[in-house]
Amino acid sequence: MEQELTEDTLLGGRLRIRQPKHGYRVNVDTLLLAAAVEAMPGSRLLEAGCGVGAALLAVAARTENASFVGVERDANMAAIARENLAMNGMSTRAEIVTGDVLGRDANHPPFDGVFCNPPFDAEGDGRAPSQARRHAYITEQTIERWVIALADRLKGGAALTLIHRAHKLPEILAALEGRLGGVQVLPVRPSADAPAKRVLVQARKGSRAPLKLLRGLDLHDASGAKYTPEAEALLRGDQVLTWAD
């Protein structure tokens, strides 16, 4: 049976995205990750586990002359990602590779930056997702395995940027230890009076700078009904996240 897709707009209508109607869909995590990625004109970036390519496209839309590689192991999602590149006129600046980004068969030279929104849970963590969402939520690999593989794909001085559940931060920091430095952590809270549920983490190859815990981002106002102006600007692509100097 042919998979049912929807066509949606992102970044205030600047991007059009086709994605499965059922299963994992582009969400706030996707757009926050894109806003957090460090990208310069002429740079070459990798998205690990790119899904339908939404985060990759959101970074590309604000970065002239940068090029991108997205790696996605689900062949159907990779095919949709290629369609999304073409629909947004990005096929000459980006390519989608079907494969396992954690494998050792990648023949790309090191990148100027790597970013990812990896599956959050191991088998048995929390409530089991539906079969349609399983590939995006459940990983057979540890966070350490992700960090090892992606650190190998960075040029010296380049940054790995990721988003994950806040309670996984100790595991993330342990995986980064001795591999990437200059770690910066930005907590993402549902609102100012709520504990963080997500963390954005950036770490740099070859850096010896100490860890920095940043002020963080509040997604919603006190009513919980509206995004804060800062969050709204990030989600619409009007601003990028500014990491500490």
Image (cartoon, helix red, strand yellow):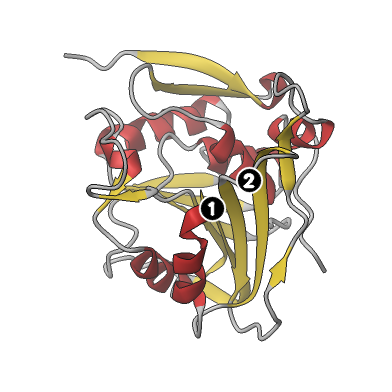
Q: Secondary structure at mark 2?
A: loop
Front-most of residues 166 and 5 = 166
Of tags 2 and 1, the one toward the viewer is 2
Residue 88: image location, x then y, percent: 57, 28
Q: Which residue bears the numbered disc 2? A: 195
Percent position of residue 49, x then y: 39, 48
* Mark 1 lies on residue: 166
Tell me where residue 57 sits by quadrant: top right
Residue 193 visible in the shown view: yes
- Which numbered disc flags the more N-terminal residue, 2 or 1? 1
Q: Is residue 34 above or below residue 4?
A: below
| Marks 2 & 1, CB-CB < 8 Å contact | yes
- Tell which of 230 and 62 is nearer to you: 230
| Residue depicted at x 47% and y 48% | 117
* Relative horizontal placement of residue 185, taking residue 173 as reference (left or right): right
Q: CA distance from mark 2 to mark 1?
A: 9 Å
Depth check: 58 or 228 in front? 228
Q: Position of residue 80 (x, y in %)?
A: 38, 29
Which amino acid lies under the numbered mark 2 shown in the image of this protein? Pro
Q: Is residue 39 left or right of residue 4?
A: right
**Would you identify the image quadrant in which residue 21 lies?**
top left
